[in-house]
Image: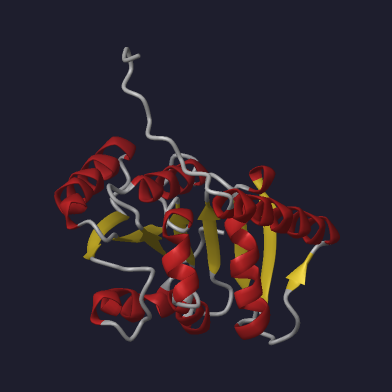
Amino acid sequence: GITGDSYNMISLGGGPGFDSVALSLAASFSAHGKESSAINAIILDYEEGWCDLVKAMDESTRNVLEQPNLSCEWGGKCDITKGFGDPINAVCLQEIGNAQMIVCQYCVAENANLLRESDFIFFRDMFEKASNGALFIFTETTPRIWPGLCKLMEEYCPYMQVAFVRNGRQMLIMKKDCKTNLFMRDEDKRLIREFQEISKFHQRKISSGWERQEQKIRGSV
């Protein structure tokens, strides 16, 4: 929970800072009109153009909620297709051990092929270097990417606890302090088998020549 002197979050692909706003709202609500615990959010994104908007979001959130202990900071570039040894991920490497929450929304599926080619090296490094008790929140438009991440954890990071919510569009992971088998409830095990079938069906469509159609311009024929 959001308790103690401070709570640190990393938002991957998080421009312009909406993950920070959501966490700040939760902290402010939980404070019941009092001063909330310090929230320190670091926004990392491949697109550097978010920098100024993150700074504006930081100031406006703190002013609107009237909570002086809220902080939303632009941390710089990040590339989830490269490992922590790459200079582009230097800030993530520096901050990961201090983060209680890591949020990654709508970044995985669009980079699925590159992530598989890299053997998910970014997330393997991230899970390994995160502190015990760290919570990871992944959100996607489709659950077909989750089997790949679960396979990664089974092979390299078996100390994780995994659950699915929102009809499988969100995966919650917590790093445990004991290196045992990957923990899932029976219902989540059933869901992962279902997601594997969804992934196989999608691969068959791609193999048969299916391509995503370009979005039509409204009003065009």
Residue 193: percent from left, percent from top: 77, 59
Residue 214, placed above or below residue 109: above
Residue found at the very far front of the displayed protein = 208
Front in this rendered view, residue 125 or 175 = 125
Residue found at the very far right of the displayed protein = 186
Residue 1, placed above or below residue 130: above
Front in this rendered view, residue 205 or 198 = 205
Residue 128: percent from left, percent from top: 51, 83
The residue drawn where x is 16% and y is 52% is 49
Residue 154: percent from left, percent from top: 68, 78
Where is the C terminus found, in terms of image quarters?
Answer: top left
The residue drawn where x is 33% and y is 39% is 65
Residue 125: percent from left, percent from top: 46, 82
Where is the N terminus found, in terms of image quarters?
Answer: bottom right
Q: Seen in the image, is 18 located left or right of residue 91?
A: right
Question: Residue 6: in sight, yes or no?
Answer: no
| Residue 163: quadrant of the picture | bottom right
Colour mode of the rendering: secondary structure
Residue 179, placed above or below residue 153: below
The residue drawn where x is 57% and y is 55% is 207
Question: Residue 54: in sight, yes or no?
Answer: yes
